[in-house]
Image (cartoon, helix red, strand yellow):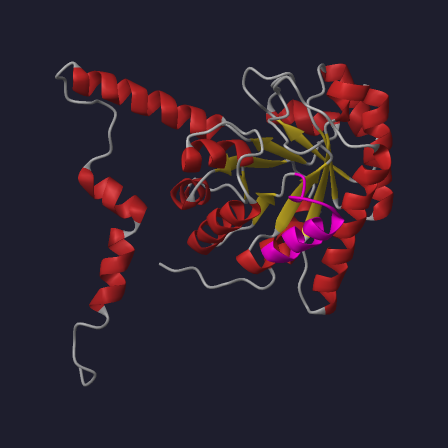
Amino acid sequence: MFPAPDLNVAKRLRDLLAGPDLLQMPCCFDALSARLVERAGFPLTFMSGFAVSAARLGLPDTGLLSYGEMEAQGRDICQAVSFPVIGDGDTGYGNAVNVARTITGYARAGFAGVMIEDQLSPKRCGHTAGKAVVGFDEACQRIRAAVDAREALRDRGGDMVLIARTDARATHGLDEALRRAERFAALGADVLFVEAPESTEEMARICRELPGVKMANMVEGGRTPVRPPAELQALGYGLVAYPLTLLNAAVVAMERTLEQIAEGRAPDGLLDFSGLRERVGFDAYDALAGRYTTSPED
């Protein structure tokens, strides 16, 4: 019922990334959505900043969430599941020292990996207008700080998988985004993420020219073409995130159900009560509680 803390969760993530197959990663926004991803059989999840901002604050992903709010949400998520969770570390919430704190704090919260990006604070969703990125040197300083923090964790027996993200495609063009990502790899990033390529040809170039594991981001209605997993793997991606799919599905389902209630109709498509109880953990709770209802002599 309560998954035991996994001190080797980063190693488990590294083992997954070293495998031959594309890893599909539906993104979560709270403990229940993360548990449903795990229950569905996926090997990992990602805590989406966009989705957390929407679910926790009812506000857009425009840098309004603080480090403390994201760390607290992530701690709840990581404690609810037994598979690896990657956290959205945004810009690191400040300068290079803040980046180091984010890496360390996310590790303590139970994350297996963290993503750090090069947007100018306050950041925003990578598929919306108005983005800006910091200069090349500052972007590299963030990744250097993240790598140093990861190495410090390793000195203490820990670890953290580092995803380095650049949003420079939208502001400076693909060549600059590739230059940054290549430098991030040289600095020690584990996974490279060039956000919002605008064609399949650009996606292929990213995979062809950059080393190591590359991450794709499938945002329905966003700037990047949504491609099936087999095609993404053929292009050369090792990891694909679906950052808004579950949030979107939840909004659609809730609005449809509210319309049915307002019209005086019984909502359709619902779980029966026993199914809902099972998914939120009542069955596991009752089984655990039952162990302690008899006397020690029984």
Task: Locate residue 104: give its quadrant.
Answer: bottom right
Residue at 18% in and 85% down: 297
Check the picture and name the quadrant holding the N terminus: bottom left
User: Percent position (x, y) of residue 31?
Assistant: 41, 46
User: In the rendered structure, does residue 67 fall within the stretch colored magenta?
Assistant: no
Say if 223 sits above or below 298 in the image.
above
In the rendered view, does 147 fall on the left or right side of 30?
right
User: Percent position (x, y) of residue 43?
Assistant: 54, 44
Q: Single out the residue that lies furthest toward the bottom.
A: 297
- Classified by dominant secondary structure, the portion drawn in magenta counts as helix
Task: Locate residue 134: give its quadrant.
Answer: top right
In the rendered view, does 163 fall on the left or right side of 285?
right
User: Percent position (x, y) of residue 144?
Assistant: 81, 49
The residues colored magenta run: 91-105
Check the picture and name the quadrant holding the C terminus: bottom left
Residue at 57% in and 29% down: 62
* Whether residue 176 is visible: yes
Q: Is residue 229 or residue 87 the one in the foreground?
A: 87
